[in-house]
Amino acid sequence: MFRILKIASAFIGIIVGAGFASGQEVLQYFTSFGHLGTAGAVLATMLFAYLGMTLTSLGHRMKTPSHKDAIYKISGRYLGPIVDGIIIFTLFGVGVVMIAGAGSILHQQFGLAPFIGSLIMAILVIVVVMLNVHRVISAIGSITPFLIIALILVGVYSLSTMDLSFAELDPIAKEQKTTLPNWFISSINYVSFNIAVGAAMSLVMGGAEKDRRTAKIGGLLGGLGLGLLIVISHLAIFSKINVVWSAEMPTLKIVNDVSPVLAIFMALILFGMIFNTAVSMFYAFTARFVEMRTKQANLFILITVVVGFVASFVGFTDLVAFFYPLIGYLGLFLIGALIYAPFKLAKDEQ
């Protein structure tokens, strides 16, 4: 049971930093559609549960140290290079966004220049990625429970202290900027984006687990847990949209209104979750090209993170608005491959 929860916690941890830790992602993908955004969050929960289970199961089945072999096997000779390219683009792109997000957190909460938080994140990522995969999984999973507790408390506070009803907040929510056309496409795009974010590391996690059932249930619970946290996060932001609409980090803004002292702790938790995702992205990106724990891998990660640090100066909100929907549309190729994968593998084994 412990190993199941460890995989579930790590699965949530991989995605949560990119998916909704700051609240900006949830605001753009769900809250901007008001009441219908809630339906989108429920749909996303069901999809995450199925795809989380599929990813860790496939990883266990193929025992892969990198996502490359697994992707080519489930996608085929022609689609494989496309899906592989999308994941490579996602890993680096989201890694850059996470470095930018770290700068935004410390800027909003402590007034530090954005590049300081980004630089701290870049240094931490370089150091941790040089560790082995089991230590990376442990590092990712250890911080996740703190965010889960924090988000639940934020949700309870927001819903219990609403100034306006959801009916009154609905038009305010719909005024928020989003690049997505409607709640349904937004929900599918969000899941597609996040699965593209979590696919590589989830396959590696499944491959590192000896028991197939443990890997499968761990992925299922991770997907369900992720979806439920998204629903909570959306309702928290929706109930306070009249207050947080202009904040780069809406979740942090809510906590700061409760208590500046608590906001310091929340800022550290958010920083930790963004760190989780950044480590996952750059670890999987490096493992795709070179053998880990070698001098070549250490040099590769150093150069990659430095390039990512420079690219992060575009800004967190702008990067989210551009990268996330783009990756979401591209990630539909991966979703299709994952849905077809169990049938393809069963056929190949006959």
Image: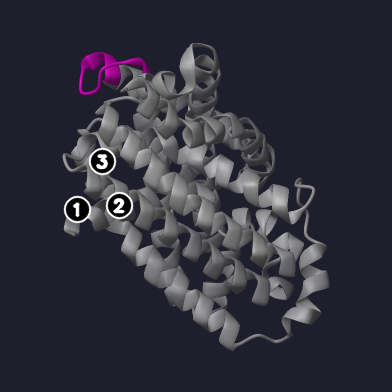
Q: Tell me: residue 227, above or below residue 18.
A: below
Precedes in sequence: disc 3 or disc 2: 3
Mark 3–mark 1 Cα distance, whole angstroms, equals 15 Å
User: Which kind of residue does numbered mark 3 sit on?
Assistant: Val
User: Which kind of residue does numbered mark 1 sit on?
Assistant: Arg
Quadrant of the drawing holding the N terminus: bottom left
* Residue annotated with mark 1: 3
User: Which kind of residue does numbered mark 2 sit on?
Assistant: Gly
* Residue annotated with mark 2: 218
Precedes in sequence: disc 3 or disc 1: 1
Image position, residue 47 (x, y; %): 52, 51
Q: Quadrant of residue 43?
A: bottom right
Is residue 316 in the magenta section?
no
Which numbered mark, 3 or 1, is in the foreground of this view? 1
Precedes in sequence: disc 2 or disc 1: 1
Magenta extent: 288-297
Q: Does residue 70 appear to the left or right of 17 in the view shown?
A: left
User: Would residue 4 be visible to someone looking at this image?
Assistant: yes
- Circle 2 — which element? helix
> How many neighbours does mark 2 have within 10 angstroms: few (below 14), some (14-19), or many (20 or more)?
many
